[in-house]
């Protein structure tokens, strides 16, 4: 399933995105998933908890894809 997420401002941090979309229930759960290499940014594993993500990028986690779009 694909989720579209509007980025408010220039970017959102990877850990914040996982919480904001409900894919992780807490910041700790997001940090653990990222550190374990279970999160892909633009089809590549990314272990940076605070990676700055911008519109046009995509994140894959737990069978879900989040597409980042600019805020309308």
Image (cartoon, helix red, strand yellow):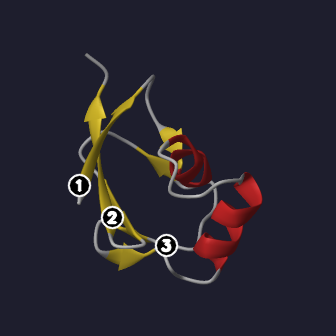
Q: Which residue is drawn at 37% across and 42% down?
A: 54
Q: How far apart are labels 3 and 1 at the CA level? A: 19 Å
Secondary structure type for disc 3 = loop
Residue 45 drawn at (x, y percent)? 43, 79
Given the current orientation, which residue lies at the most extreme bottom position?
36
Instruction: State the quadrant of the C terminus.
Output: top left
Compared across the picture, whether 60 is left or right of 17 comes to left
Q: Residue at x 54, y 82 (%)?
A: 37
Compared across the picture, whether 40 is left or right of 72 comes to right
Q: Which residue is identified by label 3?
A: 46
Q: Nearer the viewer, residue 20 or 48?
A: 20
Check if mark 3's residue and mark 2's residue have beta carbons within 8 Å. Answer: no
Q: Which residue is identified by label 1?
A: 2
Q: Which residue is identified by label 2?
A: 64
Q: Nearer the viewer, residue 6 or 1?
A: 1
Compared across the picture, whether 47 is left or right of 67 comes to right
């Amino acid at each position: 399933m694909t989720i579209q997420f509007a980025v408010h401002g220039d970017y959102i941090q990877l850990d914040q995105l996982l919480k904001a979309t409900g894919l992780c229930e807490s910041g700790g759960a997001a940090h653990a998933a990222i550190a374990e290499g279970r999160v892909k940014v633009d089809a590549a594993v990314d272990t940076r908890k605070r990676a700055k993500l911008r519109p046009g990028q995509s994140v894959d986690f737990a069978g879900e894809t989040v597409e980042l779009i600019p805020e309308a």
